[in-house]
Amino acid sequence: MTTPDPMTTPAPMTTPAPPTAFAALHHRPGRPLLLPNAWDHASAAALAAAGHPAIGTTSLGVAAAAGLPDGAAATRAETVRLARRLGRDDYLLSVDVESGFSDDPVEVAALAVELAGFGVVGINLEDGRPDGTLAAVELHAAKVAAVKAAVPELFVNARTDTYWCGHDEPEPETVRRLDAYRRAGADGVFVPGLSEPVAIAELVGGLSVPLNVLWTPTGPSLAELAGLGVARVSTGGLLYRAALAAAVATAAAVASGGPVGPLPGYAEVQALSGS
């Protein structure tokens, strides 16, 4: 398969889509979009009920809940099934599609068209591979370009795993990759593992599209990230991991006779079904 070289080939000539409500949430100086990541209908509904206007999905949570590995292109069916259900709700939905579940840009674009048909307004598309390496920048840029050509209004958040994959020189490689993805048509860029304030500020200063970072307990606070110019902050698999920890801790409290709660009641959880 021959893919275009994003360093020499311009993005496809398409008519720019008007700004969407989801895109607008990424362009509020000093007010980054906090995008919590859900793994099923109940978690998404609870987060929306708490006032979050946009919800993302977590590929880790979706995969783990199904007993499948994350980042291994094993959860296409589960991801599509969840998107079909969540896309009917009122909040803005962005879906984590790992690397698109394919190395064929045409297949990745077809997936994007399918998700958009369910009401999905954004996708997260990563360049990390299951073996811990990075996909060729040309291939990932070709995926971004194919999606934007097929669904111009879909917000493509192009993620690079330069920090997570332990690249020898993450800073210049991150800049090189993000520039290629931007020129391929990415609406925003995502660098999980980037948490050093000076590095974040320097990257924001050189970007013309919104930067998304992953919140971590040891990294900058949401307010600090806002001051650094970050446009979007994701929780990733954090909420799913917190739910697992709470379940285990509650079981331990029951076993030891310790206190439990407060917890949502049966009727409150039942109401999340929307039926």
Image (cartoon, rainbow, N blue to C red):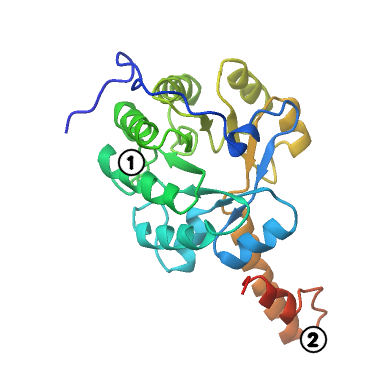
Which residue is at the front of the view, 9 or 218? 9
Q: Is residue 33 above or below residue 43?
A: above
Whether residues under marks 1 and 2 lie with C-beta atoms below 8 angstroms apart, the answer is no
What is the number of the mark on residue 149?
A: none
What is the number of the mark on residue 257?
A: 2
Q: Residue at x 65, y 31 (%)?
A: 231
Left or right, 255 with reference to 85: right
Q: Residue at x 43, y 38 (%)?
A: 165
Mark 2 is surrounded, within 10 Å at the Cα level, by few (under 14), some (14 to 19) or many (20 or more) other residues, namely: few
- Outermost left residue: 1
Q: Is residue 53 above or below residue 49?
A: above
Alpha carbon of mark 1 to alpha carbon of mark 2: how far?
53 Å
Q: Residue at x 53, y 28 (%)?
A: 18
Amino acid type for the residue under numbered disc 2: Gly
**Where residue 108 sits in the image (x, y, percent)?**
32, 43
Name the secondary structure under disc 2.
loop
Left or right, 148 with reference to 259: left
Quadrant where the N terminus is found in the figure: top left
Report which residue position mark 1 lands on.
109
Mark 1 vs mark 2: give the one in front. 1
Amino acid type for the residue under numbered disc 1: Ala
Q: Is residue 165 above or below residue 76?
A: above
Quadrant where the C terminus is found in the figure: bottom right
**Where residue 265 sits in the image (x, y, percent)?**
76, 78
Q: Is residue 257 visible?
A: yes
**Where residue 80 sits in the image (x, y, percent)?**
41, 58
Q: Is residue 59 above or below residue 269?
A: above
**Where residue 66 sits in the image (x, y, percent)?**
44, 68
